[in-house]
Image: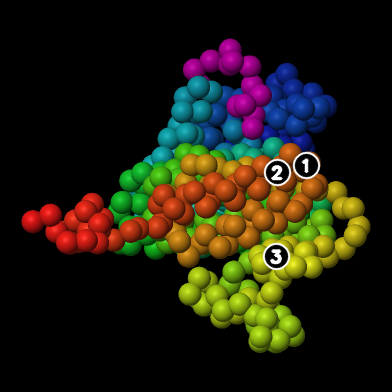
Amino acid sequence: ACLLQLARYAVPVPGQAESEPGGGGGYPSGFSSSSGFFIPTSKSVLCFKALLHFCYRFGGLLGESGWTIALRAFHSLERSLQKAPVSQGNELTLLRQALDSLFETTSLLSDAALVHVVAALGRNLRSTTDAEEGAVVLNRMVELCNFNLGRLFVVWEHILAVITEVCATRDEKQELRGLGASALCRILAQALRKGALAMAEHPEAAQDELLRHLEVLLRAPHEDTRARICEGLLGILQASGQELHPTAWSTMIHLVSTAARVELERVGLVFYLPGDAKLLKKQSNTNGADHALDCSDVTGEGVLPPSYGISTPGGGGSTAFEKSPENREVSSAAPTVFQLLELLVHDFMEYVPPESVPMLTASIGAFARFTGLGVNSSLTAVGFLWNVADALARYHCTVPPASDGESREKIHGSGPSPE
């Protein structure tokens, strides 16, 4: 109740507080009805100082409801500070600094209190339909995670739940969908930096767990969400690709292949990915066992249908086939997926696990057949396949060293020894 009263006096709302001398029209002093923000008065500054003091000293006792009240007031303050004139004096500057340091000091809170802060941020984000206010909340959520990377998994499930819900919203929160997806990728970019997960018990498994959930968002029905996730993956690879462990690399290749599949299926092009066990077995039964290719040594998933990446005399074999003759509009995420494949092929083939190479080549082959990005992109994709073949010989094909006898035989031939 005390926090609620402080928040009411701190944030002037039309008709909720008395006008100070000089105010008019029923609005509190400092409130702008046209722009929707307020310039804090001396009274509201004191209320904000009291709120900040409560959060600093008793943050572990506020609970989710208390943090929800305080953070909602702080979000309003932050929006106003962003628009307030620079020449407002030291009071607002001190408020801005105190507000920034509040999220830094969340690293001192207990795990339970940290969960309460994240839950409060989530409640405020769900209740807003304003993109600007939502951006403020998401930025603070990213900051909180960055200051608590050592125990990110304490709040990770809550972060995923909030952002996944935002990314699944309908058109009334359209702008928030992209902002939410970008915020999640910003958190991942920091968490996957060198040494960021050094305190984790199993760093390799931790990287895999962080990346794994992105598949859900790559299959989201909203194009803006998928596009932001693909852009985030591109940024993660560019900044921290060398820091990924083998298990995380397998997950990364799976995510890129999933993105390729989803975007190409939406324009009428479908291709099989290694691992589609049920679909592949069904196809092999339809076409007959005599024509099926045993690929268990390559993918571990049994047999592939004849059309899986194998050219036939009739020209029907391919990694992809046309699902619909309709000319559909290419999504904004498709070019980014192509950039992901290009980056993988040119810069990271030495890190790609051998068991993930078939999945990568399936995605590249599908783009080679797809002409929606232009003929040049199709030809470029064919070149990618040559790059993959060269990389396989360079990084993944090892020749056992020859014995001394074999070396001598290669030098002198198979005849008698010169001795």
Element assignment for label 2: helix
Tell me which segment is drawn in magenta: 79-91
Query: Is 320 on the left or on the right of 81, as rendered?
Result: right
Question: Pointer 2 and pointer 1: residues touching (CB < 8 Å)?
Answer: yes
Give me the C-alpha separation between circle 1 and circle 3: 21 Å
The residue under label 3 is 311
Which SS class for mark 3? Answer: loop
Quadrant holding the C terminus: bottom left
Which numbered disc covers residue 329? none
Q: Is residue 90 magenta?
A: yes
Residue linked to disc 1: 375
Locate residue 310, reporting x and y percent.
Answer: 66, 67
Reply above or below: 406 against 393.
Answer: below
Tell me the residue that label 2 is attached to.
Answer: 379
The CA span between labels 2 and 1 is: 6 Å
Q: Position of residue 182 (x, y in %)?
A: 61, 44
Quadrant of res 379: top right
Q: Amino acid at mark 3?
A: Ser
Residue 319 vertical placement versus 281 (above, below): above
Kind of residue sitting beneath label 1: Val
Distance from the alpha carbon under mark 3 to that under mark 2: 18 Å
Count residues near mark 2 (Cα–Cα under 10 Å), then give few for <14, some for 14-19, many for 20+: some
- On screen, residue 419 versus residue 114, left or right, reads left
Judging depth in this view, the residue of 38 and 317 nearest the camera is 317
Q: Magenta stretch containing residue 121, yes or no? A: no
Q: Residue at x 82, y 56 (%)?
A: 267
| Residue 325 % position (x, y) | 90, 60
Q: Quadrant of residue 360?
A: bottom right
Q: Residue at x 50, y 70 (%)?
A: 298
